[in-house]
Amino acid sequence: TRQRLLERLWDAEENYVDEHTLTTSISRIRGKIEADGDAYIKTIYGIGYQWMGGERK
């Protein structure tokens, strides 16, 4: 879930990562790995993200 990802992004000193940072990071990852109509990360609204493993869009 999105919340679980945010919890895992806290550092050792418990500095919290902003939700917008997570959204931006996911977008950048998609830009680097998704090409030619392959989708690796699916956004599930209200829940978080799901790894799709390269399914066709």
Image (cartoon, rainbow, N blue to C red):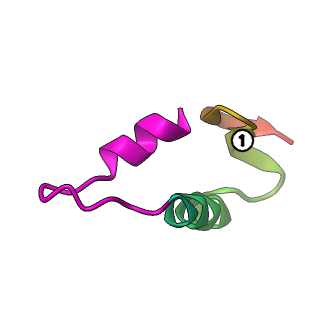
Please state the horizontal and vertical placement of residue 2, each as a whole percent of the image: 54, 40
Residue 6 shown in magenta:
yes
Q: Main secondary structure of the magenta part?
A: loop
Q: From what the image shows, is residue 51 above or below residue 39?
A: above
User: Which residue is disc 1 drawn over?
Assistant: 43
- Where the C terminus falls, by quadrant? top right
Residue depicted at 32% across the width and 43% down the height: 8
Residue 3 placement (x, y as % from top left): 48, 38
Relative placement, left or right, of 42 versus 1 is right
Residue 47 to residue 57: above or below: above
Judged left or right of residue 35, residue 10 is: left
Q: Quadrant location of residue 27?
A: bottom right
Secondary structure at badge 1 equals strand
* 7 is higher (above) or lower (below) than 33: above
Going by the numbered disc 1, the residue's amino acid type is Thr
Q: Is residue 14 magenta?
A: yes
Q: Nearer the viewer, residue 48 or 41?
A: 48
Q: Which residues are magenta?
A: 1-18
Q: Residues within 10 Å of mark 1 (few under 14, many from 20)?
A: few
* As drawn, 44 above or below 22: above
Q: Position of residue 25 (x, y in %)?
A: 53, 64
Q: Quadrant of residue 33?
A: bottom right
Snapshot quadrant of residue 47:
top right
User: What residue is shown at x 71% (from left), y 34% (from top)?
Assistant: 46
